[in-house]
Image: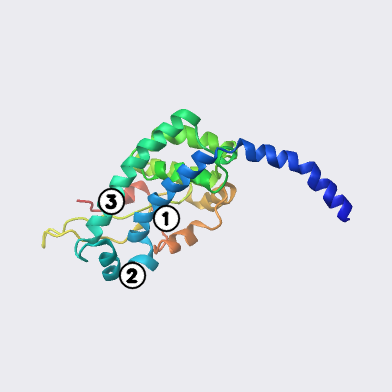
Amino acid sequence: MKLLLSTLLLALLPQLAAAQALLNPSLKHELDSIYAVDQKWRSMLFNPRINRRPDSLARSLGVTRESLSDYVMRRMMRTDSANQVRVKAILKQYGYPGKSLVGTPTNEGAYYVIQHSPDIKSSLPLIKKAAERNELSFYLYAQMLDRQLMRDGKEQRYGTQAMSYNPVNPQTGRREPQPPFMWPIEDAARVNERRRKAGFPNTVEQNAADLGIKYRVLTLKDVEKMPKN
């Protein structure tokens, strides 16, 4: 048995070495750094393990607690803008930097920069192609597709996107946040089947619960009736 395993290992070594040689280490390092910065400011806004102590976080950043959210949001937007410029150049030079070029999980770095940008439509075909070639997990493409469909005012397909509105109360003149909801889904009765095929580990109901949302099936007409301004 040991002899067989040794023989198999020796046979695989050239293939493993060849695969490693195909990786671009400098690009991998750069994308790892880009992803780390992309997540740094978002974690301060959305990660409860970090933002549950706003006083401590504000002190560490050298700002007041009252200005903390605005400060973090500005830094996040500034970082996003710089990352988007660089990733756009990377896409132009390499195409999508998938797992055969930078390995995993680095192959998700450029994806998240695009997902957080105001323009994901122009990159969707490239993301789709990468997913179809197994350079990127297909469920990530599904998330991006859903986000673009929501931006276009269309039904999403995989139930990944949620929305909330903050209309002005005419009596007080103040904006009042409304409960978030899952954006309308095309053929909602079969969404979990589509999610399973796309590689999502949970159902749309579970996804909504993870987001703190009570799942309910809505239509685009339902959304049109909601107060928004």
The residue at the point 59 percent across, 36 percent down is: 133
The mark nearer the N terminus, 1 or 2, is: 2
Q: Distance between the residues labelled 3 and 1?
A: 36 Å
> Splitting the image into 4 quarters, where does residue 211 fall?
bottom left
Is 129 above or below relative to 180?
A: above
The mark nearer the N terminus, 3 or 2, is: 2
Amino acid type assigned to the residue bearing label 1 in the image: Val
Judge depth for marks 1 and 2 and give the one in front. 2
The residue at the point 27 percent across, 53 percent down is: 73
- At which x and y percent is residue 44? 34, 60
Is 65 above or below relative to 71?
A: below
State the residue in front, 154 or 133. Answer: 133
- At which x and y percent is residue 100? 60, 38
Q: Is residue 176 left or right of residue 113?
A: left
Amino acid type assigned to the residue bearing label 3 in the image: Arg
Q: Distance between the residues labelled 1 and 2?
A: 32 Å
Is 171 above or below relative to 84?
A: below
Residue named by callout 1: 217
| Local SS, label 2 | loop
- At which x and y percent is residue 164? 30, 55
- At which x and y percent is residue 61? 27, 61
Discs 1, 2 touching: Cβ within 8 Å: no
Asked whether residue 156 is in view, the answer is no
Is 23 above or below relative to 75?
A: above
State the residue in front, 131 or 216. Answer: 131
| Local SS, label 3 | helix
Judge depth for marks 3 and 2 and give the one in front. 3
Residue named by callout 3: 75
Residue named by callout 2: 52
Asked whether residue 45 is in view, the answer is yes
> Splitting the image into 4 quarters, where does residue 22 fall?
top right
